[in-house]
Amino acid sequence: MQVSHRKENQAPVKLGGRGWFLPIEMAVVKDVLKKFFGFEELRAGQEEVVSVLLAGRPALAVFPTGGGKSLCYQLPALMLDGTALVVSPLLALMKDQVDGLLRKEVKAARLDSTLSAEEYAKTVTRLLRGEMKLLYVSPEKIGNSDFQKLLKDVDISLVAIDEAHCISEWGHNFRPDYLKLARICRQLKVSRILALTATATLKVEADIRRQFRISKSDVVKLSFHRENLDLRVTPCVQEERKALLLERLGKNGQPSVVYVTRQETAEEVATFLAKNGLGARAYHAGLPTELRREIQDAFMSGRLDIVVATIAFGMGVDKSNIRSVIHYNLPKSLENYTQEIGRAGRDGEPAICEMLACADDRTVLENFIFSDTPSSVAVRNLLERVLRLGKDFDVSVYDLATSCDIRQTVVETILAYLEMAGIVERRGRFFDTYRIKLLQPLEKVLAGRKGAEKKLLQGVFAALDAEWKWLSVKISEVADSAGISAEKLRETLSELEEAGDVVLKKSGWRQGFRLKKEPGDLRELAGTMAVSFQKREATDLDRLDQVLKLSSAKCCLTKLLLKHFGEKMIVDCGHCDRCRGIPPVRLKAKAPRRVKDSELEMIRSLVRERHAALGTPRQLARFLCGMSSPASMRARLYRHDAYGLLADLPFREVEVVAESLF
C-alpha cells in the first residue's frame, strides 16, 4: 500500500486552488467520525486518503469492492469549509447515499433527472447559499457548461469522482463525460480531488494520476486478496451449463448472484431455476425501473434468494452475506470479473466465486465489441453533419446516432473528443418539442397580453383545431417564423405553465455547441478518431483473451488475478482450484459451422430489399449477428426473419460473407 505521511502542527502551505490549507490533527478527525458515522476507528487505507485530502492535495484510492470508499470523501467534506461535489454515474447509488447522510443529519443533496423543477430550483438555491456539505451529481451534469458557470459561485471543498477508471481510454464508452472531468476540475481551480475505483490496472492507475496530477506517493491501494473467497473456473459446454448451475446453487447456499451476458439469457436461466424450485428472478436493463427496484429490494431484504443478472446489477449494491457469485457466461474482462466477485462474502464468511467457462461465449462477447466500433466513413459523416452547421448550433444525439448509424454512447464520445481538442464548446441542453394542452379557453389565456406577446401566442395556437386537445410545437421552427429566439419562446410557454394556463410535456433533447476553431481536414480528423476506436476494439479483445486464459492458467488463480492489478503475492492463496490440485484446461470453442445455402439465399434476398440501414457490409454483418444499431432499430428491422440469422458465428466471418454479397 502506498501512503503519504504528514507532520503534525506544520504551518499552512499554499498548494494551489482556493485558499490556504491547514493540516488537521487526526484526533479531531476521529471525533467527527464518531459523531456522524458512529465509528471509533477508520478502516485500512481510509486514514491515509483523508490525510492527503485534508492537506489540500489530490489522491487516488484503489479499494476493492466493499472497501469503504465513500467515507474517504464524506468525512473530510464535513471537516472542510464549502461543499464537496461527488460525481457518480449511478442514480440509485446517489439517492441511497444522500438518504443515508440525511438520516445522520448531514446536509447533503443530489441534482439529477428524477427531481421536479421546484425541487431542482430549491437545491440550487441551497447550494449557492452554502447550505450543504455534499452534493451528488452525474458526470453529464458537471460536464454541462451552464452548471459549470453556476459552480464558479460555489465554494467547492473537494471533488470526489467515483468509478474513476472510466476516465482512462479503455473505459471511455461507459460514460463519455468522464473524459472531460480532469479539465473541468482544473477550470474550477479545485485542488482537492479524490479519484475512486475498485478496478485499476497499473496502466489505468498511471492514466488517472496523469490526468488529475496526483503524486505517486498519494495513491492509496488496498490488496485485492480476499481470503474468504474460493475462486473456481469450471470448463464446460453450453449443453451442460444449466445442470451445473442448478447443482452449484443447491450446494453453495444462498443468497447468490448469477451473471449472464444477454437479457434473454437472464430471463431464460431465471425461469429454469424457478421451475426447479429455486427462488430466482431476472434483472437487466430491459426491465422497467420500478420492477428493477422491486427485485433489488427483495434481494437486499432476504425475500429473494437468487438474482440472475446482466452487469446492470451490482454497482452500489452492498449486501454483506452473498454466499456465491456464479458467472454463467464469461465476463468481459478481468476488471469486470474482479468487481463482480467482490460482491461475495463481504461479511468475511466463506463464499464461492465460480466461472462456468464455455469458449463458445467468446462469439457473443466479441460481437458486442465489434458492434461499438464505427468506421472512418461513419465518423466522417458525423463530423461533416456537425461541423458544417455554423458558429452556434445544436444537435440531437439520438438523430445523429440514427442518421450516421453510430451508437449514442459513441456519438457522445466523438463530441467529447471535439471538446477536448478545443474545436467546439458545449452550451446548454434543451427540449425542442413541446406538447401543449390548454387548461382554460384561449381567449382567457390571451386576455391582458401585450400586442407582441399576444400575436406570438396566437401564432403558436393557430394550428390547434379544437381547444382542450394536445398541440405539438417544434420550438425552433415556431420561433424562427415568429422572428424571436427559441429561448424567448420557451420562457413564454413556461410562464403560461406557471400561471396555470397550460400543461407542457417536453421531448426532443438537443445539445447546444459553439464552434471555437476550424477543425481542419475532416477526412484526417475522422481517420484519427476512427483509429482510436479501433485501438479500443483491439484492447477489449485482448482483455477478453485474458479471461479465457484463466482456465488454462497453471498457477494460483488468486495470484494471477492480483498480478493483473500490479499486486505481488508471495505464497499461493490455498483456496482456489489450482491450489486444490485441479488441473488447468485450455478452452476450445467448437469449429464455426458453414453458412447454409438457404441462409445465403435469405441474405441475398435481404440485400435486394435495399434497406438504407443495411447499406454497408459492416451494417449487414452486425444485423446478421443479431446486434442492433440505431438505424436498424428505427427501421424496425429487428422484426425481419434474417435478424440474428448468423448470431452463432464469429463477427469477422459474417463480415466476410456480407462483403461477398455487395
Image: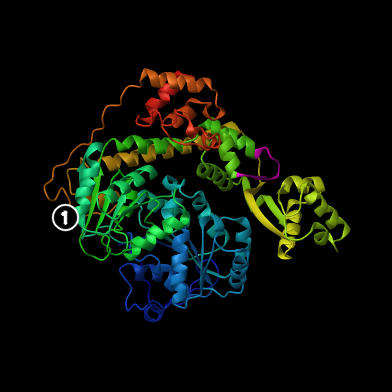
Residue 554 part of the magenta-drawn span: no
Which percent across, then down, holds residue 491?
73, 58
Residue nearest the observer in this picture, 436 or 568: 436
Looking at the rendered structure, the secondary structure element under dot 1 is loop
Which residue, given by chain and number where applicable, does mark 1 sit on? 575
Q: For mark 1, does the 10 Å Cα neighbourhood hold few (<14), some (14 to 19), or many (20 or more) residues?
A: some
Vertical comparison of 227 with 242: above or below:
below
Q: Nearer the viewer, residue 242 or 227?
A: 242
Q: Position of residue 591 (x, y in %)?
A: 27, 27
Q: Report the side of 375 relative to 50 (left or right).
A: right
Residue 56 seen in the current view: no
What residue sits 85% from the left and 53% below the top? Answer: 455
Q: Which residues are magenta?
A: 387-396
- Where is residue 168 drawn, in percent x and y? 43, 49
Residue at point 31%, 58% (across, down): 343
Q: In screen coordinates, is 361 left or right of 624?
A: left
Residue 68 as seen in the image, left or right of residue 139: left
Rendering coords of residue 247 (x, y %): 19, 49
Q: Quadrant of residue 452?
A: bottom right
Q: Residue at x 53, y 64 (%)?
A: 190
